Every structure is written in structure tokens, then in C-alpha cells.
Image (cartoon, rainbow, N blue to C red):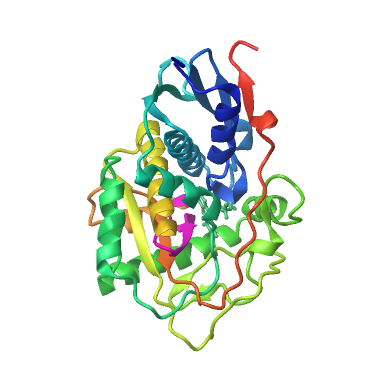
């Protein structure tokens, strides 16, 4: 009996893991295969130091890749046993993954199918409300990772959160190093293998209702729907009790699960991290939205895209050979 996936299955799982969302599509991860295990490393050379000075987004991105890998493996008949931070002397060794044969469940297959369909959708959403039942389902998913997903549905929570998003964008846009990073990583040709392509950035409004989206240069994506229609996108705050590397990695796994389930529900989704990249606005979200309970790790906007919205192109990824190596080589 096989004790781990064959090379081709492993490569396919790593290719699907690479479809994970990452800050500015920086893909800050590396994988190494051992004889019967797979290892995830953070690639610190891809840290966006002006945008993400404390590396929170980098760790969340790696957590998303780790969860994507588990989802892809499960769908191909391999359950995973994950050891996070297996080597205390090597903090960039984020996880080792062992495999056990197991028949895929219906949920495993559904979630893996969502990997290829998920997109970051920065466009306007419709006025269709997001049912509380679906928000509860997403919150339950986040809970299985030891994280809390809090929808900012109360008017005061929502007010404080959108204020933090707006203030953070003003602060960041006044910072030349931030602007330089944005120009390097975003508004790019879709033919390079990293960064945010111009084809995935809306041309028009960067505010949807009360919500300030991150401003990107060179947008080429037409917005759909009517600009007079209310945008009923919900804002969800994903929080952890601690703020160490382990908590951030798990938050990335939870974020991935929430995004994939939301995709399975046919929702449009967009991570919004600006408010948590700036210390003052992060504290505002912690104190005024979470009432001091928990550390905010990421904000997720979810809603319904207009029925006439064009399908979004998939953003590019680095080839598997660039991110997967053999241990000890
Ligand atoms: C930790 C993290 C933070 C992100 N922050 C933002 C953000 O503030 N604004 C935004 O429009 N997209 C944000 N994104 C989405 C990325 O830009 C997106 O995942 C990447 O460009 C790849 O595109 P895809 O998600 O469509 O595959 C974030 C993603 C992650 C994982």
C-alpha cells in the first residue's frame, strides 16, 4: 500500500495550493518534498515590508496555501496530518505534512472544486442581502480552526470598521515606500507570473457604498451592475486570541476555508487587509469593533456579484518547479 501520494499527485496538490490568495499575489511560499512528507516554508524574500511591516499578511498567505494543500490532498484521496512549526530553531519552516489514504467525502470534492473557481472580486456587489444563515456557516468554518469570524453587521461596528479602512488607506497612500511597492507589484501584465494584473483591477470607483477598497494603479476591469444600486457587501473580521506566528498561520488556514466555502455558495469575496497593516487602525478595529476581545487578522468582504458581471480571469502563478524542491537538495 502507498504511504504517500505519488510524485504527480503531489505536484498537482502543490499546484492547487499555489492557487491560494496572497498579499499582492506575492506567493511567499516554498515547498519541499521528503520521502513520505511535504514541508512548507515562508519565503521572506517576498515580504512586502512597506505594506506588511510585521509580516502578518505573509503568514496569512502561507496559511491559505497550507489549507489549499490539505483540501487538494483530501480530494485526491489523501487525508493530511499537519505539524505546525515542527522545528523551533527554524521559524520559516511553517509546517510538515504527512499523508494517510482516505476516501474523499462530498465536501472534500466540493471544496477542491472551489479552489479553481475562487477569485478576488474587487468590483461592486449587488443589493441582495447575504443571508444570516450563510454568515453563520462561514463563522462555524472559521471556528474549526480556533479562530472567530465576526460579521460587522451592527451599525456601530460597521461604522468603526469602514472608518478604519478609510483612515488606513489615507495613511498608506501618503507613504512613498508603500506607493513604490504598489507600483512594483500591481497593475501588471497578466503574462508575468506574480503580482496583481491590471485585468483584475476595476477601472472605476474604489469606494463601494461606505467601504473604501485598496487603490491599485492601471485598472482595466469594467465594473458591472448599476452604480445607483446599493452595495450590500458584508464585512467580516477574522480574529484570533493570540498574535504569534502560529495564530497567524491558523488565521490564514481559516481565511482560506471561509473563502472556499463562500465560493461554493457562489458568493463574491475580497480580502481587505489595509486596516490591519497600520497600527493605529488595527488598534481601532481591535478596541471598537472586537471590543478588545481578540486580535483582528484580516477583513473579508463578501456579497453577490451582479448577474451580468463578466467572469474574472484567474490571476497568474509561478510554475510548480519554482516553488517545489526536494528536501536536502
Ligand atoms: C493576506 C491577504 C491580504 C490581502 N489584501 C487585499 C487588499 O487589501 N485588497 C485587495 O483588493 N486584495 C487583497 N488581497 C487579495 C490578493 O490581492 C489576491 O489574493 C491576489 O492578487 C491573487 O488573486 P486571486 O485571489 O484572485 O487568486 C489580499 C490577499 C491576502 C491573502
Tell me if 28 is positioned left or right of 3 in this view.
right
Give percent across and percent down for residue 108.
39, 42
Tell me if 67 is positioned left or right of 184 in this view.
left
- Up the image or down, 6 lies above or below 65; here it is above
Quarter in which the C terminus is drawn: top right
Tell me the residue at 62%/52% (across/down): 178
> As rendered, which of 61 and 288 lies closer to the eye?
61
Asked which quadrant contains residue 231, the reply is bottom left
Tell me the residue at 30%/40% (across/down): 145
Q: Which residues are magenta?
A: 265-277
Residue 276 within the magenta-colored segment of the rendering: yes
Quarter in which the N terminus is drawn: top left
Q: Extreme bottom residue here?
A: 228
Asked which quadrant contains residue 165, the reply is bottom left
Give percent across and percent down for residue 122.
55, 66
Say whether residue 67 is visible: yes
Q: Extreme front residue here?
A: 1
- Up the image or down, 303 lies above or below 16; here it is below
Give percent across and percent down for residue 121.
54, 64
Looking at the rendered structure, the number of numbered marks drawn on it comes to 0
Tell me the residue at 48%/15% (across/down): 36
> As rendered, which of 109 and 209 lies closer to the eye?
109
Tell me if 224 is positioned left or right of 106 in this view.
right
Tell me the residue at 50%/22% (across/down): 38
Give percent across and percent down for residue 50.
59, 46
Tell me if 254 is positioned left or right of 310 in this view.
left
- Up the image or down, 293 lies above or below 173; here it is above
Residue 227 within the magenta-colored segment of the rendering: no
Amino acid at each position: 500500500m502507498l504511504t504517500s501520494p505519488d510524485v504527480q499527485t503531489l505536484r498537482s496538490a502543490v499546484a492547487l495550493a499555489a492557487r491560494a490568495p496572497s498579499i499582492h499575489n506575492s506567493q511567499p511560499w516554498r515547498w519541499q518534498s521528503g520521502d513520505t512528507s511535504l514541508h512548507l516554508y515562508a519565503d521572506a524574500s517576498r515580504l512586502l515590508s512597506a505594506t506588511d511591516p510585521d509580516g502578518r499578511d505573509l503568514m496569512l498567505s502561507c496559511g491559505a496555501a497550507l489549507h489549499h494543500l490539505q483540501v487538494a490532498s483530501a480530494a485526491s484521496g489523501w487525508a493530511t496530518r499537519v505539524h505546525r512549526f515542527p522545528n523551533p530553531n527554524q521559524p520559516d519552516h511553517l509546517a510538515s505534512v504527512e499523508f494517510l489514504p482516505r476516501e474523499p467525502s462530498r465536501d472534500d470534492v466540493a471544496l477542491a472544486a472551489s479552489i479553481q473557481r475562487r477569485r478576488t472580486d474587487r468590483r461592486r456587489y449587488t443589493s441582495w442581502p447575504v443571508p444570516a444563515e450563510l454568515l453563520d456557516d462561514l463563522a462555524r468554518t472559521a471556528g474549526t480552526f480556533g479562530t472567530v469570524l465576526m460579521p460587522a453587521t451592527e451599525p456601530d461596528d460597521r461604522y468603526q470598521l469602514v472608518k478604519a479602512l478609510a483612515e488606513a488607506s489615507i495613511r498608506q497612500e501618503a507613504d512613498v515606500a508603500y506607493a513604490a511597492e504598489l507600483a512594483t507589484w500591481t497593475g501588471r501584465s497578466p503574462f508575468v507570473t506574480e503580482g496583481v494584473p491590471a485585468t483584475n483591477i476595476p477601472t472605476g470607483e474604489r469606494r463601494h457604498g461606505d467601504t473604501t477598497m485598496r487603490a491599485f494603479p492601471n485598472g482595466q476591469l469594467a465594473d458591472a451592475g448599476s452604480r445607483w444600486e446599493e452595495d450590500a457587501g458584508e464585512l467580516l473580521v477574522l480574529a484570533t486570541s493570540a498574535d504569534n506566528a502560529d495564530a497567524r498561520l491558523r488565521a490564514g488556514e481559516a481565511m482560506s476555508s471561509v473563502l472556499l466555502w463562500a465560493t461554493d455558495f457562489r458568493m463574491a469575496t475580497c480580502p481587505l487587509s489595509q486596516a490591519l497593516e497600520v497600527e493605529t487602525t488595527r488598534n481601532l478595529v481591535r478596541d471598537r469593533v472586537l471590543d478588545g476581545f481578540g486580535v483582528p487578522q484580516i477583513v473579508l468582504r463578501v456579497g453577490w456579484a451582479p448577474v451580468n458581471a463578466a467572469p474574472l480571469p484567474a490571476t497568474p502563478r509561478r510554475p510548480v518547479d519554482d516553488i517545489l524542491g526536494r528536501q536536502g537538495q
